[in-house]
Image (tube, rainbow, N blue to C red):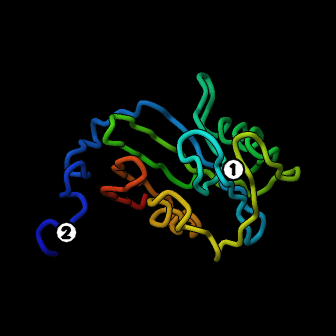
Amino acid sequence: MPAGSDPSDRPGGLAEVDWSRWEPTEHAVLCFVRDGDLLLLIHKKTGLGAGKVNAPGGRIDPGETAEEAAIREVREEVGVEASRLTKAGELSFQFVDGYALHGTVFFAASHSGTPRETREADPFWCPVGEIPYERMWEDDRYWLPLALEGKPFRAFFVFDGDRMLSRRIDLA
């Protein structure tokens, strides 16, 4: 590999983050609700990632487990009651502005209710083979296929705003 082509060698890249000592400033969740070959995705309308396609999710409240937060966030963002959750993986994001986010990714094998638009999100069902990665966070195209294949992972990313500077994905 030519010198400088490894994304971890770029300024602000993984080589500059000591992930063994890294501490997030916030903890959050994502919850992909599955219905056969469909995923429930959202057009995010507010907060971090507004304007992007994502899964329902958000911050973990004090005293709440990651799974409880995932169920609550799906209910609040799209009006669906998610159940039978399984943990798919973990995401660690370091932003060059100092923000540091740890995310736990879940899949819900079942749900009740009909998705509805809220102040935060406009939900839609998407066939797994048609996931609009070009409208999502840049990192999603690297870890979401692994999660969909049932491969547990831990992923580490450095971002400058919306631009990914570096990535590392470890299979668990």
Mark nearer the viewer, 1 or 2: 2
Percent x, y for residue 104? 53, 45
- Identify whether 89 is placed above or below 151: above
Percent x, y for residue 115? 82, 52
Q: Is residue 86 left or right of residue 48?
A: right
* Distance in Å between CA atoms under marks 1 and 2: 39 Å
Q: Residues within 10 Å of mark 1 (few under 14, many from 20)?
A: many
Asked if the residue under mark 2 is in contact with the one under mark 1, i.e. CB atoms within 8 Å, the reply is no
Task: Return the mark for residue 49.
Answer: none
| Residue in view at x 64 percent, y 49 percent | 44
Nearer-the-camera pick, 127 or 155: 127
Q: Secondary structure at mark 2?
A: loop
| Residue in view at x 62 percent, y 41 percent | 46
Percent x, y for residue 81? 81, 45
Q: Quadrant of residue 165?
A: bottom left
**Residue extending farthest left:** 3
Percent x, y for residue 123? 75, 54
| Amino acid carrying mark 2 in the image | Ser
Q: Is residue 58 left or right of residue 39?
A: left
**Residue extending farthest top:** 62
Badge 1 is on which residue?
A: 85
**Residue extending farthest right:** 113
Q: Earlier in the sequence, mark 1 or mark 2?
A: 2
Nearer-the-camera pick, 155 or 136: 136
* Quadrant the N terminus occupies: bottom left
* Quadrant the C terminus occupies: bottom left
| Amino acid carrying mark 1 in the image | Leu
Q: Secondary structure at mark 1?
A: strand
| Residue in view at x 30 percent, y 57 percent | 166
Q: Is residue 43 left or right of residue 26?
A: right
Q: Residues within 10 Å of mark 2 (few under 14, many from 20)?
A: few
Badge 2 is on which residue?
A: 5
